[in-house]
Amino acid sequence: MKEKKIQHKGRLAQTGIYLSKFLRMFVYQNDWKVIPMGAIIAALVTFVVGGNIFRTQEGTKLGVFALVCVCIWNGFFNSIQVVCREREIIKHEHRSGLHMSSYIFAQMIYQLLLCTAQTIVTLLICVVAGVKIPEVGVVTPWGMLDMGITILLITYTADMMALMVSCLVKNTTTAMTVMPFLLIFQLVFSGGFFSLEGIADKVKYLTISHWGMDSLCCVGRYNELPMVTLWNTLVGFKDVEFSGMTPLKDILVKIEQEGYRDELLQWSGQQNTVASYEATMQNVTYNWLFLFILMLVFIILSIIALEFIDRDKR
């Protein structure tokens, strides 16, 4: 008798099969919970800092940092456990003809759908929270679309990073242990709030948070916003007396009475501009490109990690 050849599904067909599987898991295994959970986190953050985002430079920097944290958190939670929780099944199916690239491509499509839904929910929450999103975009004609693309890229890149980790570790316990350290690394080396020097300043270029913050500050037109730190500092010293007089208070009252306060705030902002935050198409697309490069690296490493799953003796 002739030996019968086993016909395996092609890569495209396998991608469709696994995508269908993930969509069923979304419905029947409660994977949909990541969307309301992400919405709650976004709501908590935006309702606290949303009033000043894209209104002042200080409020924008703090708000953008918080928003980037939300995006990275959402992305991590989407996929940090998806591969390692079914590692043995994947190993068995790989031996039966599964193409790991098909599996990862199916995950990419599925995670993109999740991230898109989270992006839409985040934007809606921002609107409800009173976030003043610029009407005119930097890359597209609409500021809302620019912001949406940026939030999606940050979330999806973080998602692919978590997917890579899930492909590398052996179980969900390890994955959930690693995740907080990854998040702390992203926040510390964002370059937004901590002063980085030497090697640390170079490391920030490897983080999602750095490119995400720069991109959102560009889209939010950070350099065109007023800065209130100088005014608030002067107000804090207004009652200081010199020879029985309070000249600083008199000057501040005069500025307010003659309507120069807003001009002073705007002038303060002009002295505090950051070149990488300039609202230009070149800056925004440059940041988007690096997020895309990081995303591509994470995807390639995920495929490579799973290709060696048969050697895993754990």
Image (cartoon, helix red, strand yellow):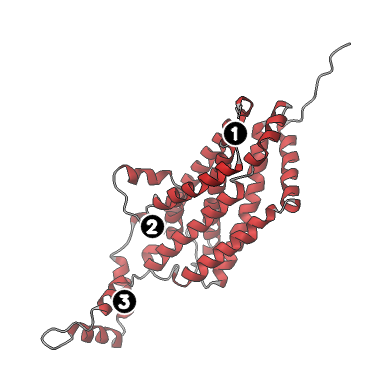
Name the residue type under label 2. Answer: Tyr
Name the residue type under label 3. Answer: Glu
In the image, is residue 308 above or below residue 195?
Answer: above
Whichever of callouts 2 and 1 sits on the residue coming sooner in the sequence is: 2
Tell me, for residue 263, which label it has, or none: 3
The percent coordinates of residue 140 (x first, y second) are 52, 58
Tell me, for residue 277, which label it has, or none: 2
Q: Residues within 10 Å of mark 2 (few under 14, many from 20)?
A: many
Mark 2 or mark 1, whichever is nearer to me: 1
Q: Nearer the viewer, residue 221 or 244?
A: 244
Q: Judge left or right: residue 225 versus residue 158.
A: left
Residue 96 makes an appearance in the image: yes
In the image, is residue 177 above or below residue 259?
Answer: above
Whichever of callouts 1 and 3 sits on the residue coming sooner in the sequence is: 3
Q: Residue at x 29, y 70 (%)?
A: 268
Indicate the quadrant where residue 253 lies: bottom left
The percent coordinates of residue 250 (x first, y second) are 21, 87
Q: Residue at x 30, y 63 (%)?
A: 272
SS of the residue at dot 3? helix
Whichever of callouts 2 and 3 sits on the residue coming sooner in the sequence is: 3
Q: Which residue is mark 1?
A: 303
Name the residue type under label 1. Answer: Ile
Q: Residue at x 72, y 43 (%)?
A: 19
In the image, is residue 190 above or below residue 127?
Answer: above
Cα distance between the residues tagged 2 and 1: 35 Å
Indicate the quadrant where residue 275 lies: bottom left
Cα distance between the residues tagged 1 and 3: 55 Å
SS of the residue at dot 2? helix
Q: Residues within 10 Å of mark 3 (few under 14, many from 20)?
A: few
